[in-house]
Image: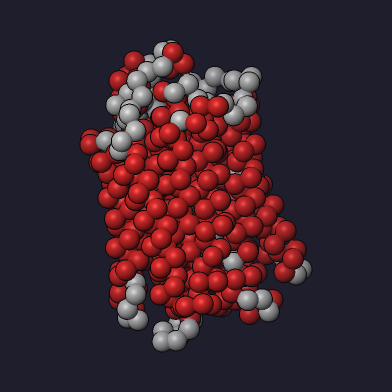
Amino acid sequence: MTGYRTGEPGYRRVVLALFAAGVATFALLYSTQALLPELSAAFGVTPAQSAWSLSLTTIGLGAALLITGPLSERTGRTRLIHLSLTLSAVVGLACAVAPGWHALLGLRLLQGVTLAGLPAVATAYLREELHASTHARAAGLYIGGTALGGMAGRLITGPVAEAFGWRWALAAVALVGLACAGIVAALLPTSRNFVARPQAAVTRRALTDPALLILYGIGACAMGAFVAVQNAIGFRLTGAPFGLGAAAAGAIFLVYPVGTVSSALSGRLADRYGRRGVLPFGCLLMGAGLLITLPDRLPFVIAGMAVLTAGFFCVHGLASGWVPVRAHLGGVPAGQAASLYLFAYYAGSSIFGSLSGAAWSLGSWPAVVLLGTVFVLLSGGLAAALRRVPALRPSAAAATAPAALVAATSAR
């Protein structure tokens, strides 16, 4: 089978289901980010310590990806997706009733583990079940769903926390996760083209292919820059000179639909012009967005965050969709390569993003922008290096792939 094509009912069901799954996963993942000032006040912890409510979740997710990716090569994709969404929403409800700070941190770490099922297999599932001509576009739409989920997780929590407290805010996001899990259960087609791999250990090629290694690095650095800014923006907007409340400060995440649009648009452009040409542009957008946020004027902050978001989802959408394609042509199981990319991505979030608390304490917003700029420059340098890495031609491992798939991806 060559996979579902654009316009076919199966294609629409896949895209809508994974869009909803992306919304649920990333709403739950980032549900505490807009609450960092409230958690800091409620538990008497510093801004840097409050960021652990997010960093531990991404640490748990990143570590679990090293297991769920190879596991999906044996057990299949759809089972993990359904299990991940349901368990993560249930743990989200438990977070809302956590009796203390350390209990909340432990539950958030567990939630990172349960969330790993979807990101580990989503792009591999798309590559297997959709026609090759739709891969970059569909990956962009999936990343768009994660952008909307990230916005929902932050945007819902601010107003609810201001009105009813942080516990009700986390409960509201968990209910959104349960609703999305129901949508996915109703829509997501079972795998038609999945082939189990009994030997699913990480292959040497997944850790030595130069393009894959560069893509892992791009994901880590871009995510580190983005999360560093997101972790600090609440403290900036609730402090002088803005003095916004939690709900008003959380409204900054209304820029996230820009990421949904940019990821889908960059996927279309990549289908036409190639990922190598479009990816560096996303890094330029990220850098420009950071600089625009420097003035203490709210319109500049909003505009800068919008540009930063557009650039980030362009970079992440292209890089994450490229990994399974490159891996397939090199004879690397797509689930393994996707898991390694996401492990690097969330390591960047946990390690680089957690530095924002120290940067904020040392030099306020300019220090946070400087930190983010360093990681954006690293991403841009890696994207430039990627242009010099030769494209793979169909390997023996890919010889059995559909001809259309080989033709569409051999030049990537």
Q: Is residue 95 left or right of residue 293?
A: right
| Quarter of the image where the N terminus is located | top left
Rendered location of residue 338, percent (x, y): 50, 36
Name the image quarter holding residue 55.
bottom right
Residue most extreme to the left: 273
Q: Position of residue 330 (x, y in %)?
A: 44, 23
Q: Quadrant of the C terminus?
A: top left
Residue 266 visible somewhere in the drawing: no
Say which quarter of the image contains residue 271: top left
Residue 402 visible, this orientation: yes
- Give the residue drawn at x 63%, y 27%: 201
Residue 355 lies, with reference to residue 149, above or below; the image says below
Q: Residue at x 40, y 42 (%)?
A: 319
Q: Position of residue 142 (x, y in %)?
A: 42, 43
Above or below, 314 against 388 in this view is: below
Query: In the image, 342: left or right of 210?
Result: right
Q: Position of residue 75 (x, y in %)?
A: 63, 26
Task: Identify the residue at horizontal 35%, vertical 49% (top origin).
Answer: 381
- In the picture, measured across the screen, residue 28 lies left or right of residue 132, that is right
Which quarter of the picture shows residue 248? bottom left
Q: Is residue 56 above or below residue 344?
A: below
